[in-house]
């Protein structure tokens, strides 16, 4: 039977492993077996933010849906980009940037309950 | 159906916003903006089954007035306010604009005409601009926080739940200046 510290170690490793990488340059320079992957941390931060948006406001249009899809595909895409030629990476970046600002958007500040701005989703039926 | 004498309405679209009998007599007019960016979208929203807010009159950019509800009935425009039963107590008048775009001159004139007609209809005594101003209120002067809107107990019962019709422009200009509307009403 495994001890509690051992179990906690397994859980911590399982939780952290997706965020770690074995970058040869970094591990060699720092003399550690693994390092945190900045790109994976950034993807995680975006995922947390997107989950919060989904939970509280849902998805209203393609810009938000595209971002959600991009986050899901971020890690495999990053892995593929590491093996791609610079010109291909630039082409992908150009295609992404070109799409910015396209499609219907909503005023993000208005979808949350505590917004002080009027919203078409306001429900003022209860007037005390 | 109540028709306010002297009030020119471009279109009546009653029964598409939530209406209910008044819970208390009318005592004033509350000004809003509806947070819209296009007139046609603004009007269309009030026919959408998901819509749970509504005004008696919506004033479009060019000054056209859309009557969304029978003026004899209350609409869900105010929510919890300093004045109880504010949906009934106040007529709801909204300009079709948002917190950053100033109401047009045509909108301000049309809102003033609506207010003038309503004040005359009810024979509310107005011997000065101050009298008129007492009958005209911005949503931000009345809307208070309640537990339904924030979990911050310190805000409950306090103003600040809404910013319309003043708006949130960086230059500080008011989207609708209620004092200015009162002056226009007084002039007419």
Image: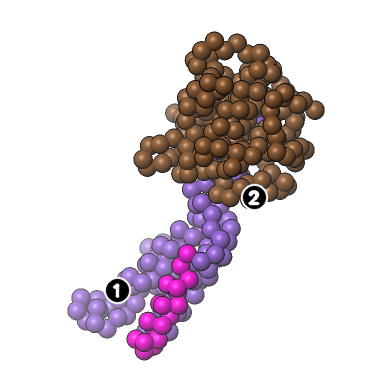
Q: Is residue B85 visible?
A: no
Give the residue displayed 49% in from the left and 60% down from the top. A50
Spot occupied by residue B85 in the image (x, y as percentages of width and height)? 64, 23
Q: Quadrant of residue B174?
A: top left
Res. B40 mark = 2
> Which chain, by letter, is brown?
B
Q: Position of residue A42 (x, y in %)?
A: 38, 66
Chain identifier matching the purple colour in the rendered picture = A
Count of numbered badges drawn on the protein: 2
Q: Residue at x 50, y 55 (%)?
A: A52
Task: Identify the residue shown where x is 25% and y is 79%.
Answer: A27
Secondary structure under tag 1 reads strand
- Tell me the residue at 36%/87% (across/down): A87
- Residue A100 highlighted magenta (yes or no): yes
Instruction: Write down the region rendered in magenta.
Output: A83-101
Residue B36: x %, y % from top left: 57, 46
The numbered dot on residue A35 is: 1
The disc numbered 2 marks a residue on which chain?
B
Q: Is residue B133 above or below residue A79?
A: above
Q: Is residue A94 magenta?
A: yes
- What secondary structure characterizes most of the magenta part? helix
B53 or B8: nearer the viewer: B8
């Amino acid at each position: 039977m495994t001890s509690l510290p051992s179990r906690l170690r397994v859980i911590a490793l399982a939780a952290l492993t997706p965020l770690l990488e074995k970058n040869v340059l970094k591990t060699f320079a720092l003399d550690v077996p693994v390092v945190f992957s900045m790109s994976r941390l950034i993807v995680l931060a975006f995922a947390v933010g997107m989950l919060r948006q989904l939970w509280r406001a849902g998805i209203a249009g393609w810009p938000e849906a595209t971002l959600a899809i991009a986050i899901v595909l971020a890690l495999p895409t990053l892995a593929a980009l590491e093996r791609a030629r610079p010109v291909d990476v630039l082409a992908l970046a150009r295609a992404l940037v070109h799409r910015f600002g396209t499609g219907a958007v909503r005023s993000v500040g208005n979808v949350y309950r505590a917004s002080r701005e009027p919203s078409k989703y306001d429900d003022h039926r209860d007037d005390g | 159906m109540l028709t306010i004498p002297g009030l020119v309405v471009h279109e009546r679209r009653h029964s598409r916003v939530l209406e209910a009998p008044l819970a208390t007599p009318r005592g004033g007019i509350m000004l809003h903006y509806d947070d819209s960016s296009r007139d046609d979208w603004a009007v269309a929203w009030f026919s959408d089954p998901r819509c749970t807010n509504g005004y008696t009159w919506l004033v479009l950019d060019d000054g056209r007035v859309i009557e969304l509800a029978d003026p004899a009935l209350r609409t869900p425009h105010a929510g919890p306010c300093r004045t109880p039963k504010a949906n009934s107590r106040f007529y709801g008048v909204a300009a079709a604009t948002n917190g950053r775009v100033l109401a047009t001159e045509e909108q301000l004139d049309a809102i003033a005409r609506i207010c003038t007609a309503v004040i005359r209809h009810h024979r509310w005594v107005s011997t000065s601009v101050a009298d008129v101003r007492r009958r005209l209120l911005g949503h931000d002067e009345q809307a208070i926080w309640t537990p339904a809107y924030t979990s911050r107990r310190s805000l409950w019962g306090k103003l600040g739940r809404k910013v319309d019709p003043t708006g949130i422009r960086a230059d500080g200009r008011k989207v609708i200046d209620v004092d200015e509307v009162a002056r226009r009403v007084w002039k007419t």
